[in-house]
Amino acid sequence: MVDKSAHVSRSVIAQSSQTAPRAVNSRDLLGGERLLLIKHEEEFYRLQLTAAGKLILTK
């Protein structure tokens, strides 16, 4: 039998020491919508899902 808790602990430690960027699923980000407004500092950006399933980010 494999002790999964020890494996998870090592995995969490390894992830915290890496500098890989965080990955977010676009479906989770859009939340079922086709348009998301993102505020960055004082500017708003639009992340839009097209009919072809592509993402467009505009200012």
Image (spheres, rainbow, N blue to C red):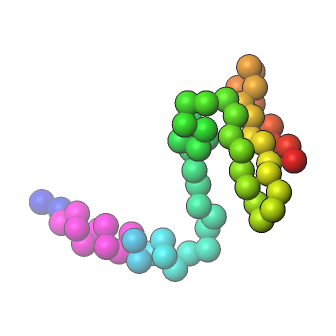
* Residue range corresponding to the magenta coloring: 3-11
The answer to whether residue 19 is magenta is: no
Give the residue at x 77% y 65%: 41
Q: Nearer the viewer, residue 23 or 3?
A: 23
- Which residue is found at the position 48% from the left and 71% from the top? 15
Q: Residue furthest left?
A: 1
Nearest the eye: 48 or 2: 48
Q: Is residue 49 above or below residue 5?
A: above
Total count of labels: 0
In the image, taking residue 13 as reference, residue 51 lies left or right, namely: right
Identify the residue at the far front of this view. 42
Q: Main secondary structure of the magenta part?
A: helix
Classify residue 14 as left or right of residue 20.
left
Q: Is residue 39 above or below residue 3?
A: above
For this view, does 1 lie left or right of residue 50?
Answer: left
Quadrant position of the N terminus in the picture: bottom left
* Residue 3, picture quadrant: bottom left
- Residue at screen point 22% across, 68% down: 5
Q: Residue at x 53, y 41 (%)?
A: 28
For the residue pair 27 and 16, the one nearer the viewer reads as: 27
Q: In this rendering, is residue 20 above or below 16?
A: above
Quarter residue 9 falls in: bottom left
Residue 34: x %, y % from top left: 67, 29
Query: Residue 30's x, y, as percent?
Result: 60, 38
Q: Is residue 7 left or right of residue 18?
A: left
Q: Which residue, as the protein is rendered here, is positioned at the far right? A: 59
Q: Position of residue 47 (x, y in %)?
A: 74, 41
